Amino acid sequence: MTDYRLDRLLAQAAQMTRTQARGAIFLGRVTVDGKPCNRPEQKVSQEAVLTLDGGPLCWQKYVYLMLHKPQGVVSAARDAHDVTVADLVKAEYPRRTLFPAGRLDKDSTGFVLLTDDGHWRKIYLPCAAIR
């Protein structure tokens, strides 16, 4: 298994910046496997149990979301004129860049997968279809 810097894992798990994560670590707000840790550069396994202010944190390398796309929303990560599926989840995942895997027309409703896993997303791109 790969080990990661504590500040990186904390930033992703708690949806904060790396600077905010370092501050929390220095202030003693973080434990790793039940032990206080004040070194942001400490290497941590992704299986380690992290807590922030006594509450458990769940770290995920990638996010996969099932979304029921409402009518009038664009199946895109960004759009200058319309609300996108990424806009619908931005408040919940402010530090993640989520893209839709697949497409539905603006006037259609239905299931859309959102992810920040580039490999998974490519599998579902229309141009990747097996011919």
Image: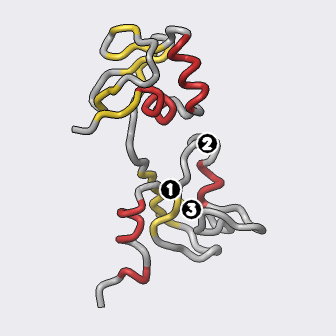
Say which quarter of the image contains residue 74: bottom right
Residue 23 at x, y percent in the picture: 58, 18
Which residue does the image show at 41% across and 20% down from the upper left? 56
**Quadrant in which the N terminus is drawn:** top left
Q: Label 1, label 3: how many angstroms apart (C-alpha)?
A: 6 Å
Neighbours of disc 1 within 10 Å: few (<14), some (14-19), many (20+): some
Mark 1 and mark 3 residues within 8 Å of each other at the beta carbon:
yes
Residue 122 at x, y percent in the picture: 40, 70
Q: Label 2, label 3: how many angstroms apart (C-alpha)?
A: 19 Å
Q: In the image, 45: left or right of 21?
A: left
- In the depicted structure, whether residue 25 falls above or below residue 18: above
- In the drawing, what numbered circle is on residue 67? 1
Q: In the image, 50: left or right of 84?
A: left
Mark 2 and mark 1 residues within 8 Å of each other at the beta carbon:
no
- In the drawing, what numbered circle is on residue 94? 2
Of discs 2 and 1, which sits in the foreground? 2
